[in-house]
Amino acid sequence: MTANLHEGVVIIELDGETRELEATPGAAMKLSRLYGGLTPILGKLQAMDIEAYANVIRFGLGMKDKEASQVHELIFRSGIVNLMEPTIDYITCLFNGGRVPGADSDPKGAKKKAARGKRSA
């Protein structure tokens, strides 16, 4: 997965242009309402449902309605197969509060070690 672990961002190539899908509460809510939860979206993405890709990319990019009208064409030119992994990764980030599962922005125990270091100083 190409992701910025600290910012909840998944990188996609959309019609030759690098774009960032940002995992936000707003995107999660819009997609959840549209599909009756986030889990059903995964099945749609695996089935290569172009409308599902369009919605995930649209909300991940924060596109307005006018901008979103061109998303289907961009997806088609990009090739759905090339978008599958990053869009599924993006939904997984939404499942995990905007973070890549298993990634920790605070290295294991760093806060505890810092606290222990202060006591012994």
Image (tube, grey):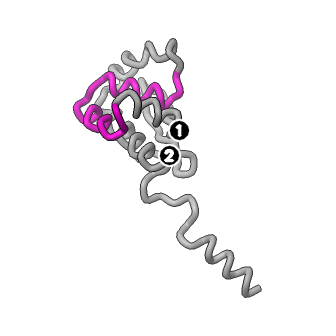
Q: Magenta includes 60?
A: yes
Q: Position of residue 77 (x, y in %)?
A: 35, 20
In the rendered image, which residue does mark 2 sit on? 98
Q: Amino acid at mark 2?
A: Gly
Q: Position of residue 18 (x, y in %)?
A: 49, 32
The answer to whether residue 42 is left or right of residue 7 is: left
**In this picture, is 30 found above or below 106?**
above
Q: Position of residue 54 (x, y in %)?
A: 38, 24
Q: Magenta includes 50?
A: yes
In the rendered image, which residue does mark 1 sit on? 24
**In this picture, is 23 found above or below 70?**
below
Q: Which quarter shows the C terminus? A: bottom right
Circle nearer the N terminus (1, 2): 1
User: Going 52% across and 22% down the picture, which residue do you hit?
Assistant: 63
Total marks in image: 2
Bounds of the magenta span?
A: 36-63
